[in-house]
Amino acid sequence: MAPLRIAVLLKGYPRLSETFIAQELLGLEARGLDLAIWSLRRPHDGAVHPMHRKIRAPVSYLPEYLYQAPWRVLRGAVSALRRPGLWTFLALARRDLARDFTANRGRRLGQALVLARELPAQTDHIHVHYLHTPASVARYAAALTGRRWSASAHAKDIWTTPDWELAGKLDDPRLAFAVTCTAAGAARLREVAAGPDRVSLVYHGLDLSRFPAPPESRPARDGSDPADPLRVVSVGRAVAKKGFNDLLDALAALPPDLHWRLAHVGGGEELAALRAKAAALGLGQKVVFLGAKPQPEVVALLREADLFVLPAKRAPSGDRDGLPNVIMEAASQGLCVVATDFAGIPEFLRDGIEGRLVPPGDWGALSNAVNLLARDPVERARLAAAALARLRAEFGAEAGFDTVAHLLGDAARR
């Protein structure tokens, strides 16, 4: 039997911040699916992860802006005129434009025209990551071509997409299934869907085969030696939902007798503002912003660190995290984690059992937690060991790969 051919639609590819997608693509290829990647945007990162080089799927880029490829869009429009799904597509377009008459909506309709024309005829199914704009393109293209589609929802797409749009996609008759990676996200989607049983919780987990075993031991740093300060690491895009402003406030409030250094990894639109804030708080000599880094360099930092901190919270826009993979990556290296009791984080880390959790947005509580753990290497080791054990027992990636591969296979064969 020929392998099932799945078109995977992404907002951008490859992206350093989306290791969870790359590891799933590898896992699905290992299970015999023939994947082809379609991206709405070309990459903007200056590097790629080693995982990206192992993915065999060919990559095609849709026009990010329609004026950049007018002939592709025109050919897509002409091709649509001959498709049985044209009237379904036009009805969807009319309803969505009535609610959201914007250039962004028009761009997604144009990208769908291109995708519908350029998808190989032997493509069995369309799967999309993120339920906001990428899912719009997938839904429109599925309507035009008569294919079924499915979606993986993650974070921003769940919490910032209007209810009417989420419900329209989740209740679309061509949607085979939707999966999401946290119980909180699943609850939100089931709340707006008329058919909540179409939404499944599938944790990304972590493919531990890609990571080295954790260090056998760590130095018992307690922040008392200015020549060997405590090493703190945080990883994530410099955006509001990551809470890095709170982290800088928390670090500035630490007692002067505690000696520490912070390394932050990640790009993002708030990076310059964070650098300026660190300087204004007098932390310029203690904080270094390294920018985006490929995963081997991130893992090396985690192995050398004493404490990992990620104070995620709700952004003013409503955006929020799911369960950040980097927390599990820190746990994989036997590193103690301080985070917030928010979004999907407590689904993996329980306060006082696998890590320390503080209320989101409470930099005072965050400062206190960092201070106490900084001075207690034994407690850090206890929490880190428990998090590693939970990761190995309950949050491996293989089960998730199996579930998604089964769902895709079932949908594509119908």
Image (tube, helix red, strand yellow):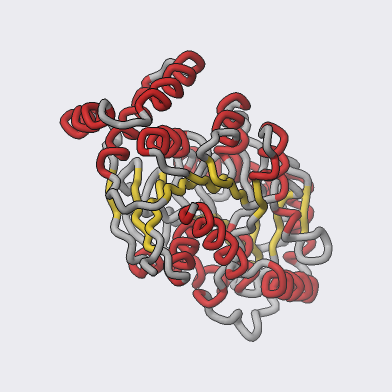
**Along the horizontal axis of the image, is 67 left or right of 164?**
left
Image location of residue 93, percent across then percent down: 42, 22
Would you say residue 15 is visible in this rendering? yes
Residue at position x 63%, y 32% in the image: 318
Image location of residue 333, percent across then percent down: 60, 74
Would you say residue 223 is visible in this rendering? no
**Along the horizontal axis of the image, is 90 left or right of 233?**
left
Q: Quadrant of residue 219?
A: bottom right
Of 397 and 369, the residue lying toward us: 397
Task: Examine the rendered structure and indicate whether residue 373 appears above or below residue 156.
Answer: below
Image location of residue 225, percent across then percent down: 66, 71
Task: Examine the rendered structure and indicate whether residue 406 appears above or below residue 215.
Answer: above
Residue at position x 67%, y 52% in the image: 201
Of 161 and 223, the residue lying toward us: 161
Of 391 and 214, the residue lying toward us: 391
**Along the horizontal axis of the image, is 274 left or right of 11?**
right
Count of marks overlaid on the render: 0
- Of all residues shown, which one is farthest toward the left? 71
Task: Examine the rendered structure and indicate whether residue 323 appears above or below residue 30.
Answer: above
Residue at position x 75%, y 54% in the image: 346
- Of all residues shown, which one is farthest toward the right? 352
Q: In which quarter of the image is the N terminus?
A: bottom left
**Along the horizontal axis of the image, is 169 left or right of 260?**
left
Residue at position x 78%, y 53% in the image: 368
Image location of residue 322, percent across then percent down: 63, 48
Q: In which quarter of the image is residue 381?
A: bottom right
